[in-house]
Image (cartoon, coloured by chain):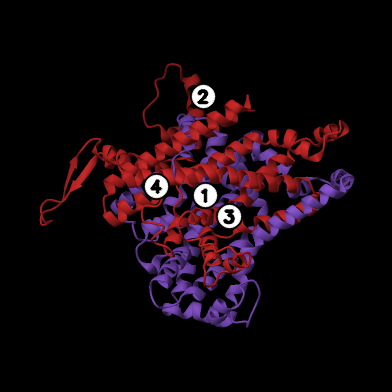
Chain colours: A red, B purple
Amino acid sequence: MSSATKTSEAGPARSATRSTPLPSAGRRPRRRMSWRHVQSLKGASFTWPFVAGFAVFTVLPVLLGLGQSFFTVKSSGLGFSAAQTSFTGFDNFVRALGDETFWASMIRVAIYAAVMVPVTMMVSLTMALLLDAVRRRVANRFRLLLLIPYMIPGIVATMIWLYLYSPNVGPIRPVLALVGLDVNFFAGNMVWVGIGNLVVWGTIGFNMLILYGSLQAVPRDVFEAARVDGASEVRIAFSIKVPYVRGTLVLTGLLSIIGTLQIFAEPTLFRTVSPETITKDFTPTMVIYNQAFQVGNLNYAAALSIILALVVGIASAVIYRLANRVDK
Amino acid sequence: MSLIDTQIADPDLLDAGSASPRGSARRRRAVEHDAGEMAGRRGGSKWVVIIGLVAFALYSIGPAWWLIVSATKSKQDLFTTSGLWFSHFNLFENLASLFSYQNGIFSLWLWNSTVYAVLGSLGQTFVALAAGYGLAMYRFKGRGATVAFIIASFLIPSTLLTIPSYLLYVQLGIYNTIWAMIVPAFFSPFAVYLAKVYTEGAMPSELMEAARIDGAGEYRIFFRIGLRLLTTAGATIFLLHFVGSWNGFFGPLVFLRDSDKWPVMLGLYSWLQRGVDSTVDLTSLVITGSLVATIPMVLLMIAMQRYWKSGVTMGSLK
């Protein structure tokens, strides 16, 4: 490294950026510092566009939402005069804590998540273990087929299943009728089975891909050693492979929980078919959307969003802790 | 670190990365020999595995098959014939009515989706590569805080941002404009994180030193060397956002009001809603439209598997 070249290189840049004259004492060390300074400033400038945008489109909305939730808009009288915005402290949060429709939707989705996330993880893990048990060339072919649902846009996937379930055009109900089952996927609790099935269909490919990736990273000689010791393939799968991918399982499980608690698109599309079962307050995100854009109470919707975010955060933290405790 | 794991885990990358073709072939044979031995030893369990995989494959493909078959049927056949096999081939008539309905608004929606996806992805890729490169290659005041903010922001559920973002967009005057779909997309913390991790693995600091000695400035090093070495990262970020933007639903629903600005997913949803509400039967249009809106995504993802697979795997390991 020739520091002389660098000093002469950084010289003009330094004098261009620094307008204040440097004190003459201790000049040499300062000169080196300022070359470093210019370089790190230039390095930092690569991040400035992002930092600015992040501040405007992520940090600012979070602060704005917090601020909004402490205010209430009151339209006075018959609405002739302008609406008054007043600071009401924690009123919106107090109201939210006692909001039965909101908590009913939260419980509905929590139960759904408690069933769905383990099911999704188990099905994806089974798929990944099956793929891991065949030759790599066969696995690559199957892997592409199993990833097809992941490539289909979520809205399209929901529409496909809506039609598949439908009594008019769908092939599922005639098939079930042959066995003597009459299932209406749009009424009562069957709605959750219907939504659950389509979510499983859409997400197992993605989870399988991640789990398969970490299974492939398990050193193969471990299996060979287990086989020499007489372990069966099933035993190897459950005693070696599954513990190896536990960390990946916890992470993918967490991601699905965060996504599931905020579920919006699927029930919203199902609502077009059965509005009497899927009410406008079916899931927490639907309550928030409804409060904000149908009722028009943005402040209350902001408070509900914060509560939902807290619930999601607490749920993730608790599950992360539990998973790590089991690990020990 | 996790990038390296991914590359080793991915057989395509492993093959592509090995220097000599003979070495690659030998390695592959060794792997297959190992797997073959295992499969051969237990003939019974091998069939259980294959049957299981076939069942999963049928479950995965079945609905997609139904969509393809149904898009080729006339309205009458859709309701009267079995959904799993072809009837009278009516695809071209369906396409004609799809693109002519409401003065061809469907092609406008496709165009909007394309514009949002292309511009949003280009901006996001460039901003993220620059920021990731800066965070990976330089030490400066505020670097640690920036990384901490990026990682903390992964924990923010998107629902939390939606309502305040709506208020903000109204204030900024971008609500119900195409910019609401494009500009905020530029600044993705996750993309920056991806770019940072990729840069750490792909850009040796010795190379930077050498370029500096040759007299290249910091920006020149980024544009002439950095961007070239980060092509893979750029393609991954571009692709992931392209697909995410194309499939987006909640964002456009909240931030766009006029139907001539909607992307194709929102448009299809509006038809689904209307088709159930009124006497007009839009079922056939929704099905054909879904197929048309899906095919580009499937082709794109199959063609660029290498990129999104590594991105997806890394995303989960963050």
Badge 4 density bin: few <14, some 14–19, many ≥20, Cα 10 Å: some
**Residue B106 horizontal side relative to residue B195, left or right:** left
Residue matched to label 3: A202
- Work out whether disc 3 and disc 2 sit on a shared chain: yes
Question: Which chain hosts label 2?
Answer: A
Type of amino acid under label 2:
Arg
Q: Position of residue B42 (x, y in %)?
A: 87, 45
Give the farthest residue toward the front: A180
CA gap between label 2 and label 4 equals: 62 Å
Residue B11 appears left or right of A289: right
In the picture, the disc for residue A105 is 4
Tell me: residue A246, above or below residue A81: above
Specify the label residue B126 is tagged with: 1
Above or below residue A267? Residue B26 is above
Query: Could you tell me how far apart the alpha carbons at marks 3 and 2 are, in whole angstroms?
Result: 57 Å
Q: Position of residue A240 (x, y in %)?
A: 74, 33
Q: Are discs 1 and 4 both within one chain?
A: no
Picture quarter with the N terminus of chain B: top right
Q: Mark 2 points at which residue?
A: A32
Q: Is residue B142 left or right of residue A180?
A: left
Residue at x-position 70% and y-position 36%: A242
Mark 1, secondary structure of its residue:
helix
Measured as percent of width and height from the top left, residue A164 is found at 56, 66
Task: Inspect the image, locate mark 3, and give the three-letter code of the amino acid beneath it.
Answer: Gly
Calculate the distance from the C-alpha at mark 4 to the C-alpha at mark 3: 23 Å
